[in-house]
């Protein structure tokens, strides 16, 4: 069908779930659509830690190329995977309402037999835990809170990572809550890590298209969520202003509370020993520059030294 919108997606279960969600939104607008599956480097290299292979754009590059080549009309991404500077010719068409932004701990075979939330209290006296994650941000925050623990690399889609955890001797692994919850794979014994700040835009889904595709821009605007778009833009501005990439442990969360925006952000050294954080509350009417302002303040108050240490390989 010539009128059909072609939705580009990766082939993982989570990516397909997200693409089908967008397909349903389009159907509700009376727009037919079909999925087009595209493989990415992030799906084929499952051993190298993400921070070593340049995670920024690794899950989006293949879809960007397909978009620019006219093979697909729109692409659907987990927004935290999208570079803060999109490829030339590609623009944001819609941001969907955010799901959970939280990170969660999925216990592994090496966890305490009587595992509970208390087992992960910072004052616990148990043997050092072994935690798995490929995220340098999660690793740094975990080691900042639990400096005696060990961290192992864990790659793959959510299904592969869950299987690896079950087959390991790890104490547990860290996942994004939204990813597991969307496809019904969150284990009952998973623990919300309320103290861990998320990646900028974690839990949000973004739809992108070519900047001259007025049809896709118009139909996708019908399910665009302005509140989520504002909060994720602030978080991504914070990341961009800090010049953060995959090897920089930067976290950010913006939330609308009444007529105000509450923002929390931090930057850590890779080993988790150094940490600087910031919190700001501003009226929604003055929130447009909140991400840049928070980043500038954080840099003045110790963040610059951490950033320079990371650049120097410390």
Image (spheres, rainbow, N blue to C red):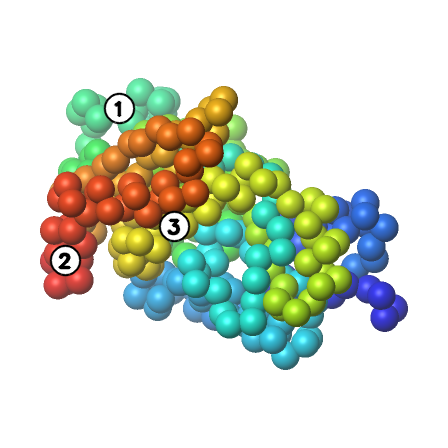
Tell which circle, 2 or 3, labels the residue nearer the N-terminal end: 3
Q: Nearer the viewer, residue 158 or 303?
A: 303
Locate residue 256, reporting x and y percent: 48, 29
Q: Position of residue 146 (x, y in %)?
A: 20, 35
Q: Is residue 70 above or below residue 303?
A: below
Q: Residues within 10 Å of mark 1 (few under 14, many from 20)?
A: few
The residue carrying mark 1 is: 121
Single out the residue that lies furthest toward the bottom: 69
Q: Which secondary structure, mark 1?
A: loop
Observer-nearest residue: 115 or 219? 219
User: Which is more foreground, mark 1 or mark 3?
Assistant: 3
Task: Give the quarter of the image for residue 69.
Answer: bottom right
Q: Secondary structure at mark 3?
A: helix
Q: Residue 58 falls in which quadrant of the image? A: bottom left
Q: Are marks 2 and 3 in contact (CB under 8 Å)?
A: no
- The disc placed on residue 151 is none
x 37%, y 22%: residue: 116
Mark 1 or mark 3: whose residue is earlier in sequence: 1
Residue 87 falls left or right of residue 28: left
Examine the image and state in which quarter residue 1 appears.
bottom right
Q: If the image is split into quadrants, where does the C terminus sit?
A: bottom left
Which disc number belongs to residue 308? 2
Q: Foreground mark, 1 or 2?
A: 2
When the figure is inspected, residue 56 is found, relative to residue 189, above or below; the finding is below
* Residue under pointer 3: 237
């Amino acid at each position: 069908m010539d009128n059909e919108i072609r939705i580009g997606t990766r082939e993982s279960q989570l990516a397909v779930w997200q693409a089908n969600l967008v397909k349903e939104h389009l159907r509700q607008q009376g727009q037919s659509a079909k999925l087009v599956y595209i493989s990415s480097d992030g799906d084929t290299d499952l051993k190298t830690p993400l921070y070593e292979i340049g995670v920024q754009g690794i899950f989006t590059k293949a879809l960007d190329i397909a978009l620019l080549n006219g093979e697909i009309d729109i692409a659907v991404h987990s927004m935290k995977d999208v570079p803060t500077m999109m490829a030339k010719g590609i623009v944001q068409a819609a941001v969907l309402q955010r799901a959970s932004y939280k990170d969660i701990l999925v216990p592994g075979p090496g966890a305490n037999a009587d595992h509970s939330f208390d087992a992960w209290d910072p004052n616990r006296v148990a043997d050092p835990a072994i935690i798995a994650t490929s995220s340098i941000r999660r690793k740094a925050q975990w080691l900042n809170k639990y400096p005696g623990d060990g961290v192992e690399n864990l790659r793959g889609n959510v299904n592969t990572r869950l299987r690896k955890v079950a087959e390991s001797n790890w104490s547990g692994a860290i996942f994004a809550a939204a990813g597991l919850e969307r496809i019904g794979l969150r284990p009952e014994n998973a623990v919300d890590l309320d103290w861990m700040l998320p990646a900028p835009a974690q839990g949000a889904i973004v739809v992108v298209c070519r900047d001259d595709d007025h049809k896709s821009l118009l139909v996708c605007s019908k399910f665009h969520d302005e509140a989520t778009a504002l909060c994720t833009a602030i978080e991504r501005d914070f990341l961009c202003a800090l010049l953060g990439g995959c090897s920089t442990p930067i976290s950010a969360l913006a939330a609308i509370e009444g007529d105000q925006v509450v923002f929390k952000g931090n930057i850590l050294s890779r080993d988790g020993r150094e940490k600087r954080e910031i919190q700001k509350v501003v009226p929604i009417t003055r929130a447009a520059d909140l991400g840049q302002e928070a980043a500038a303040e954080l840099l003045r108050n110790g963040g610059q030294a951490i950033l320079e240490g990371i650049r120097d390989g410390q």
